[in-house]
Amino acid sequence: MKLGQATIKDIAKALNVSTSTVSRALKDYPGISNETKKKVKDLAEHLNYRPNAVALSLRKSKSNTIGVIIPEVVHFFFSTVISGIEEVAFANGYNVVLCQTNERFSRELSSIETMLDNQIDGLLISYSKETEDFNHFKKLLDLNFPIVFFDRVPEIPNTVNVIVNDFQGAYDATKHLIDQGYKYIAHLAGPKNLTISKKRMEGYLAALTDHNLSINNDWIFHCPEGTKEESLDIIKSLYLKGGILPDGIFASNDIAAAGAMVALKELGYQIPSDIGIVGFSNWQFCSMIDPPLSTIAQPGFKMGEIATTLLLSCISNKNNSDAKGETVVLDTELLIRQSSVK
Amino acid sequence: MKLGQATIKDIAKALNVSTSTVSRALKDYPGISNETKKKVKDLAEHLNYRPNAVALSLRKSKSNTIGVIIPEVVHFFFSTVISGIEEVAFANGYNVVLCQTNERFSRELSSIETMLDNQIDGLLISYSKETEDFNHFKKLLDLNFPIVFFDRVPEIPNTVNVIVNDFQGAYDATKHLIDQGYKYIAHLAGPKNLTISKKRMEGYLAALTDHNLSINNDWIFHCPEGTKEESLDIIKSLYLKGGILPDGIFASNDIAAAGAMVALKELGYQIPSDIGIVGFSNWQFCSMIDPPLSTIAQPGFKMGEIATTLLLSCISNKNNSDAKGETVVLDTELLIRQSSVK
DNA sequence: AACCACATCGCAATCGTTTGCGGTGACGAT
DNA sequence: ATCGTCACCGCAAACGATTGCGATGTGGTT
C-alpha cells in the first residue's frame, strides 16, 4: 500500500491467478501460456510494478548490496575511490551503502555490525587510523564472508587487497628531489600504524640510501593528524632551531606538504629555489597553490573499480572457497610541478 | 546459516519454545515468565543473536534507512553535508545509503528508483545540474513520501528545504570587495538552472546597485562546468581583450575563483593589489593557495544535521499529513583572507 | 471407454520476524 | 464438582516474493 506500490499479489488478484503464476509469467518461465504472460506483463507495466527488493533479499538471502567502510569522504583520494566503486557496483546491479568511520575504531565496528544486520553481500574496507586489532575482520574472513581491502590493508594472510605501490611512489618522489639537486631531504610521515606510512617511509629511506645520502632521524616526523596545522608547526619549529636544515621535503600526504609550504613561505624561504617539496595523493589543490605542488598521483577511481570487481567475483565464488589471497598493486605517477624543480 | 547467524527460530528450537515466545522475551513483553525470559536472553547473548534487519523491514514496512542523493562526493561542501547527515542518522538508529549522480539526470532517476525498491523511509536530495524537470519529485511528494531538499532545492510548493542564504552571502562578498575599494567587479556565475546560482547573482547585483555601481553584463560569465580550466579560459580571454577591465571578481564557487587567480597571475596581475577576488564555499585549499582566498563559508555539516532532523520528523509524522512546507535558511560567513584585502 | 501426454496453473512452504487471538494448566472460590 | 481468573505460552497470519511439487483439464490414441 505504501507508495501505492503494486505487489505481485495485487496483480494476481486483479487477474484471478495465483501469485506463483504472476511471478513465473514476469520471468518468462515455461509452463505459463503466452496469453497469461501477456496479461500479467501488461498489467505489471500499467501498475508500474517493481519487485520489492527487501522481500527478495529475505527470500534469496542475497541483498545485492555491498558495504563500503572508509575513514572520511572529505579525503579527496577516498572520494575518487567511491566513484570507482559506484560505477562498477551499479553496472552489475549492486547497491552501495557507505559509512565513514571518521578514523574511529568504534565507529568501524558498529558500522560493520549494522551492515551485516542488513545482509550485505560483501564489504569493501579501508580501515581507520585507530584500528590496531584486526579480529573483527578475521572473524568474518573465517566465515568466508567476502571482503576486499583497499589502500589501507591489514596484515592478515590470504586476504584480497588493492593497494598502490607506496614504496615506489615514495622512492620516485624522493629520487626526483635528489635528481633536482636537493641533498638534505626531510620526511613528513603518516600515522605509524598504517602500512602505507611504513611503505612510504621505506621508499624514502631506500632512495636516500641508493644515492648515498645519509639518513637523519631528526628529520623524520610523524604526522598522526595529517592536518595542515600539524605540519606547519613541525616545520616552523624545525627551521627556527637553526643549524643544518633540510633543503627538501617529501611529505606522505599533500595536506602536510601544503602546511609545510605555508610555514616555509612565512619564514621567508623560497620554493623551490631554497627548498623543494613533493607531496602524495594529488589533491585538487595541488595545481592551485603557489608554487604548484609536485606530488604522487594515486589512481583512486581505478582502485575503486578493481576492488569492486574483485569483491563481486568473491561473492559469486563464495561456495567454491579456494580462498586464496590476492593483492593487486597499482602504479603511482610522479607529477612534477614547480614546487620541486630547481 | 549464512554467517552462522542465529535466528529467532534457532533459539526457539533449542529452548523448545515457540518463536513468538522468543520474540516477546527478547523485548520484555508481559506475559512471559521471568525464567523463560532469562533463558532466552542468555542464549541469545551466547549465540550473539542479532535480529535480521531485512526481515524486520519486510514485516514492518520500515527499513530505518534513508537515502541521500548528491551530485558529487568530491565536492568539499557535499562531503561535509554527508558527515552531518550520518551523525544525526546514526544517532537515531537510521542507516544511510548514498548515491552520487555525477550531475546526471538519468543517474538521479535510477538511483531514486532503486532506493525506493529497497524501501527506504525517506530521501535527502540535492539534485543534479541536468535536472530541469521535477516530476519525479512531485510524484513522490504527492504520495506523501518524506523528502527533504538541501542546498539545491526545486521550485515546488510545500516542500521541506534547507538552504544557505546565498543572496546574503553573495551580497556580503561583493560588498566586501566594494568596501575594499574595488569598483569594477565581475562575476563568475554558476550553472543557470540552479537556484543557488540565481540567488548569488542577485546578491551580487544588489550589492552593486546599492553602492551605485553600474552593472556590466559583459562581466557576468556563466560557468556551467565549474572547473578551474573553464574560469581560467574565461578570465584570460577577458583580460587579453584589453579596454576597461574589472579590478574585482566575485566567483560563485571557489574552484572558479582559483582558476581566475591562476589566469591573472599568469598575465602578470597582482592579487590583491591589482585585482581582488572572493570565492564561495570555503574549500580546504582556500587557506593554502597564494594569496589565501577570501570566501563565503557554508555550514555544510550543520546543513546535513538539520536536513536529517527534519527528514526524521517527516518520517514519524507521516500519517498526520499536514504537509506544510518549510524552508530553513542558514547563515553564511564571510571569511576575509588576503585575496581581497587591498 | 480407458488411458496417457501435455500444457497450464495453484498450493504451500520458505526466508526471519511480529502480533492478535486463542489455548492450556494451575489455582482458589463457590 | 464446577467455574472463573490468572499467568504463560503457541498458532497462524502477515510482510512480498520464489519454487518444488502436485492438481486440473484438454486432447488424442488405442
Image (spheres, coloured by chain):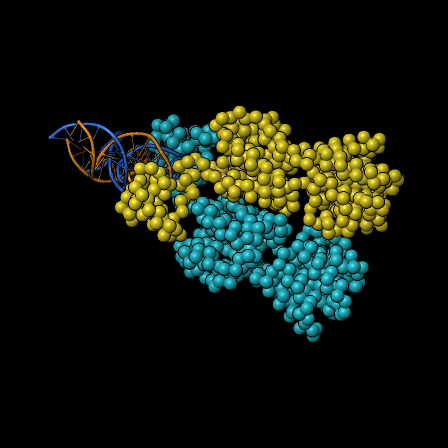
Chain colours: A yellow, B cyan, C blue, D orange
Asked if A104 appears above or below B161 in the picture, the reply is above
The residue depicted at 52 percent of the width and 43 percent of the height is A90
- Across and down, in percent, residue A256 comes to 73, 44
Q: How many marks?
A: 0
The residue depicted at 70 percent of the width and 66 percent of the height is B186
Residue with the most extreme right position: A243
- Across and down, in percent, residue A82 comes to 59, 43
The residue depicted at 78 percent of the width and 61 percent of the height is B272
- Across and down, in percent, residue A250 comes to 77, 40
Residue with the most extreme bottom position: B212
In this orientation, which residue lies closer to the viewer: B60 or B286?
B286
Q: Quadrant of residue A108?
A: top right
Q: Quadrant of the C terminus of chain B?
A: bottom right
Q: Quadrant of residue A129?
A: top right
- Across and down, in percent, residue D2 comes to 15, 34
Q: Quadrant of the N terminus of chain B?
A: top left
The residue depicted at 41 percent of the width and 36 percent of the height is A60
In this orientation, which residue lies closer to the viewer: A148 or A91?
A91
Answer left or right for D24 relative to B28: left
Answer left or right for D19 relative to B105: left
In this orientation, which residue lies closer to the viewer: A271 or A232?
A271
Residue A221, can we see it?
A: no
